[in-house]
Image: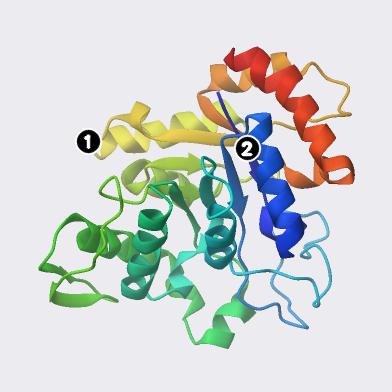
Amino acid sequence: MKFCLHFGNITFPNPEDARRLVLAAEAAGFESVIAVEHLVIPTNYTTRYPYSETGRLPGGIDMSWPDPLTWLTYVGAIAQQLRLLTGVLVLPQRNPVVLAKQLSTLDYMTGGRLELGIGVGWLREEFDAIGVPFDERGARTNEYIEAMRALWDNDDASYSGRFVNFDGMSCNPKPVNGRVPIIVGGNSKFAVRRAGRLGDGYFPATGGPAIDLAETIGAMRKEALAAGRAPEAIKVMAGCPDALPGSGKDALSAVAEREAAGVSRIVLPVSAFENNLEEMLADFGEKVIAQING
């Protein structure tokens, strides 16, 4: 079982604390760290945040949201083994040709450690600020995935779509392992379908309304079968609150339940460890990660 820490960039946005985080996480046996994204935070917004009972983002408008790719570049040069994930990057807000180059370069410079967690976004006012139509975000996401993979797969690449068009283009360096793995985030029926049909991985959202994890994973796998894909090739990552320090639960049993449901990477919030970072991560590594992975 792999273990990952999420929202590293907004929990530890400054350079020295980011360094502490990734070195301690790597020493404790964590496999990966996640950076999340918002390009801008509107002062006033009416769109409801779907992963909180209040419908509001955590923190105020002055809260730091470092760009995930920049933050991951920094920590990727410090940690030598940690995998580097976005979770999620709002894909339809990016230019896919520019992004394909940024991602392949970051992956190349870190020895193939990058994974792209994507979402379609939820904050209409943020889309308005950068001039991207909110109601087209799902269709754009699907095309952008295909277009980036076309650039990664071959030189002299071409793609023709509604939103993306290029002919005879080469994007180098290529990702170390051919492609940057793409992890689809979200619980909606559209996210489930996208994960099954296009994803290398799937990340059901860790907040918001409770979901039946096994049922959601099963639905994703049905979509994969319908698309002629091998469902087991789509790796699932998920939260596991009962494994957290102070939960009062048996962490080993909680992780085993997730594994039985089809999860291969456990995602835990950095904030659960931040008050005594190095000691708490080391303790979790010894009592949970080492016990499970031997």
Q: Position of residue 231 (x, y in %)?
A: 34, 30
Task: For residue 242, say whether it is visible.
Answer: no
Mark seen at residue 5: none
Question: In the drawing, does residue 202 fall left or right of residue 96?
Answer: right
Q: Earlier in the sequence, mark 2 or mark 1?
A: 2
Q: Position of residue 203 (x, y in %)?
A: 53, 42
Q: Position of residue 118 (x, y in %)?
A: 48, 56
- Height in image: 9 above or below 1? below
| Quarter where residue 168 is shown | bottom left
Looking at the rendered image, the quarter that the C terminus falls into is: top right
Judging from the image, what secondary structure is the residue with disc 1 in?
loop
Residue assigned mark 2: 26
Q: What type is the residue that disc 2 sits on?
A: Glu
Residue assigned mark 1: 228
Task: Name the foreground residue: 48 vs 5.
Answer: 5
How far apart are the alpha carbons under marks 2 and 1? 37 Å
Q: 10 Å neighbourhood of mark 1: few (<14), some, or many (≥20)?
A: few
Task: Name the foreground residue: 246 vs 56.
Answer: 246
Question: What residue is at 35 percent from the left and 71 percent from the top?
Answer: 96
Q: 10 Å neighbourhood of mark 2: few (<14), some, or many (≥20)?
A: many
Q: Given contact means CB atoms under 8 Å apart, are the residues at marks 2 and 1 in contact?
A: no
| Quarter where residue 53 is shown | bottom right
Question: In the drawing, does residue 112 fall left or right of residue 29?
Answer: left
Question: In the drawing, does residue 238 fall left or right of residue 223?
Answer: right
Question: What residue is at 29 percent from the left and 32 percent from the top?
Answer: 225
Question: What residue is at 70 percent from the left and 77 percent from the top?
Answer: 41
Judging from the image, what secondary structure is the residue with disc 2 in?
helix
Looking at the rendered image, the quarter that the N terminus falls into is: top right
Q: What type is the residue that disc 1 sits on?
A: Gly
Q: Which is closer to the viewer, label 2 or label 1?
A: 2
Question: In the drawing, does residue 256 fall left or right of residue 108?
Answer: right
